[in-house]
Amino acid sequence: MTPTAHEPGTLPGGTVDAVVIGGGAAGLNGALMLARSRRSVVVIDSGTPRNAPAEGVHGLLALDGTPPAELLARGRDEVRRYGGQVVAGEVVSAAPAPPAEDGDLRFTVGLAGGRTLTARRLLVATGLRDVLPEVPGLARHWGHGVVHCPYCHGWEVRDEPIGLLAVGPVSVHQALLFRQLTDDLVYFAGGTDLDEDTRARFAARGIRVVDAAVEEVVAGDDGGIAGVRLSDGQFVARRVLAVATRMQARTRGLEALRLPMEDLPGGMGNRFSSGMAGVTDVPGVWVAGNATDLTAQVGASAAAGALAGAHINALLATADTDEALAASVTAASGATAA
């Protein structure tokens, strides 16, 4: 039986060409490119995708509305079709290892439970985690009545009474985007700065501003959101709440790689720094997807993973050629000496 992402699977012995840490769109597409290039590749999938609460993936051409679990299941099957492995597990350590005899890079990846892998190259595609404001009742509706992205979820909440919980300057831009989707939008400023020019712009678009802080999200009889309770005791009926989360790259277990991190402005979060094709300052390590591009949707993350996978294969091809040339020169020298 082919193992699913939720079964441990069997780790290969010896050294593989690449280990991909993360089994989301970026990691799987990177692995797909490597597997199709006849590289030995293992994807370590923790089984905790960021978009798990969502009912469907949106804005992805030809696959719009596909449930996230179904999309990832297809991706795992495709990687396996070309000889790649997808193994369920949680990475607890990843670190440089002593190089091979020819000087090529090596990395050791440790999994919870004690299993280990050795790889020539690493692709980090761990994604991110969303940190919500600490408002009682908010987290339970995340991914359904509580949304963050007008492009991911906006059509599904169109024409609903929407409340936007302000967390900083990014919320002003977010409000204008959600106003495109509904005529009934309330901006809960909650103590954030809102200058007179912005208030005038909101008024011109019919966005109501409430300055009192939101103290509680109130659930309705149907289990969805009924509204919010304010610090002054007022109840404001809402069916949907929008909020910009603080997005933090998942870094657990990767500390020994010493990958550079970058804080984004306005308290939006932090990410792994990367260059073209996901290259990092750490030789032999690439990053792709939301771990380095916090605002990338599924399509962009998958494309970034594909580019990183192709780049890894290209540099491995160069390393293989260097090794073959060195062996050839050594053999020729030995034959001449004989």
Image (cartoon, grey):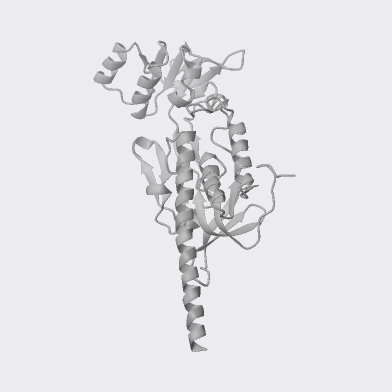
Q: Considering only vertical position in the picture, is 192 above or below 13?
A: above
In the depicted view, which residue is nearer to us: 211 or 251?
251
Figure disc tally: 0
Q: Look at the image and tell me in which quarter the N terminus lies.
A: top right
At horizontal 41% and vertical 39% (from top left) the residue drawn is 269
Asked if residue 158 shows in the view, the reply is yes
Answer with left or right where residue 295 lies relative to residue 77: left
Give above or below for 39 relative to 169.
below
Question: Where does residue 170 sit, x and y in percent of width and height?
Answer: 35, 29
Q: Is residue 218 shown above or below 108?
A: above
Instruction: Residue lying at the far bottom in this picture: please name it.
Output: 338
Q: Which residue is at the front of the view, 249 or 80?
A: 80
Q: Is any part of residue 273 visible from this angle?
A: no
The residue lying toward the viewer, choosing from 220 and 253, is: 253
The residue drawn where x is 39% and y is 28% is: 167
Q: Residue furthest right?
A: 1
How far from the left and from the top, in percent, is residue 196? 25, 19
At 65% from the left and 61% from the top, the residue drawn is 13
Q: Position of residue 39 (x, y in %)?
A: 56, 55
Near-viewer residue (192 or 337): 337
Residue 236 placed where, x, y %? Answer: 46, 12
